[in-house]
Image: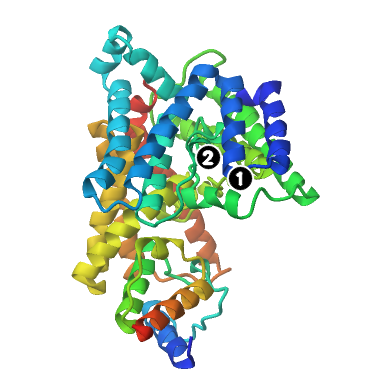
Amino acid sequence: MGLHLEPTYWAVVIGVAVWLRIAPARGTTAFGAANAIALDLLCGPAVAVAGLTLATGLWAILALANGSRSWILNGFAYLLPVAAFLAYKTAGDWEAFRTAIPTAGPVPDAFWLLAALSFSYAFLRCLDAVRTVLAKGSPLLDPLGLAGYLFPFHMLLAGPIAGYDEYLKLNADGPEALRSDRIISAASDIATGLVYKHVCAEYLRVFLFGLDSPLASQGLIDTAGLFVYLFFDFAGYSRIALGVGTLMGVPTPVNFRAPFAARNVTDFFARWHMSLGGFVTRNIYVPLQLRLVRRFGVRRSVWVAFVSLLACWLFVGLWHRLSWRFAAYGAAFALIVWTEKLVLDRRWLRPARPGSGLAYVRRGLGMAYVFAVVTVMLHLVMGEILKP
Amino acid sequence: MTTTDTSRLTGIFRTLFNDPGLELQDDLTARDVAGWDSLNHVNLMILIEEEFGVRFTTGEVSALQDVGELKRLLAAKTAVRQAA
């Protein structure tokens, strides 16, 4: 991913930042138009056209379903992105399909266009848009604005996943004025991200695996190294996106907040890939848990939370890869997070006095526990993560 | 919100989070209260629903940022309920 090292990328960023402050159109429409040009310049016309076509398709379905009481139309609006995602993941994740793709008529082109648009991330934005428009009644954007939300060039490769409601603020408030403090904050995020991604992650990769060798894991120590590498690579990318978003005035969420300082696994996932956690909380956990607690009562909330957590974590596991191993990975994390909840909620662990020696020891032990647990869990799926 | 409603709301917070000294400032957020995680957030909203006879949507539950917003939302819902 050398995109950030190309002058064209930064010329596009500056161009969009200026355009959004002078454009006569609504914020989201102006960004959608600029984003289509950015995709054309950075990824090619086919990718830009594919993005606009998909967004227009989703817009048409939402326009039909919005305000309609037909459960068929509403169900279709949810099911279509899910079906497209399942087809895309099956084609990419299942060996038999992956090897058959190159000979399957027009399928290869469609698959590679979806891959170029990072459809896994766009799928989550599709769901967020569908749910926010149909269930919450938020306004439906025009196709251009929707395309800018679904396929934002600065968050295209690996997120973060902005909420649809957050993106709508671009219309309500407009892009924030480029004051000196915002420019400094954006520059700081971009510089930190570039150092994370192109210095720390790259140095670690070369140190661990050699200059031209592919990433590999022979054991837990390698996986621990890969875990740290993943952090610098992913957090670096997200931090650059955050800085670019600030510069352009496009709502872009924070994705990482010192995850290695987490005290437990639950806390870790409140700091790692936070925008995915936010998506899952908004769209799966809260609706399901509300329904279950209303049905079974607050007294049983901890017990029914296992069902909600299991649903969330199975989704997260299978979103990464459609496989039994990733389903088991998700289920195991659900069990870990739920067990932590039980331990903390029942106060089996008395809180230590802040600033005391015991508090520091606990903090250190907690961080070591989180690192060990996540490393072991990553090791279980590392073979699949490293598959081409 | 009336003073009585505020004290009823405070009572729910104090019982749920096991903190008899908790005061509901408008800028109070989940980060400021030990135990206010996503599970207890849902419990909190259900307890408020039961106490005040209102109903929150999923979007409202997810979007709340601080106690001030909760008070305003609750005041709007109780006003609608009383008017009906």
Label 2 to label 1: alpha-carbon separation: 9 Å
Against A152, residue A184 (above or below) is: below
Horizontal side, residue A161 vs residue A283: left or right: right
Instruction: Determine crowd level at label 1: few under 14, some 14-19, many 20+ residues with C-alpha closer than 10 A.
Output: some
Residue appearing at x 30%, y 51% in the figure: A68
Horizontal side, residue A12 vs residue B42: left or right: right
Q: Is residue A331 visible?
A: no
Residue lying at the far right in this picture: please name it.
A180
Tag shown at residue A145: 2
Instruction: Determine crowd level at label 2: few under 14, some 14-19, many 20+ residues with C-alpha closer than 10 A.
Output: many
Residue appearing at x 39%, y 57% in the figure: A136
Tag shown at residue A26: 1
**The C terminus of chain B: image quadrant:** bottom left
Marks 2 and 1, the one that precedes in the sequence: 1
* Residue type pointed to by label 2: Gly
Return the chain for callout 2.
A
* Residue type pointed to by label 1: Arg
Q: Position of residue A72 (x, y in %)?
A: 22, 45
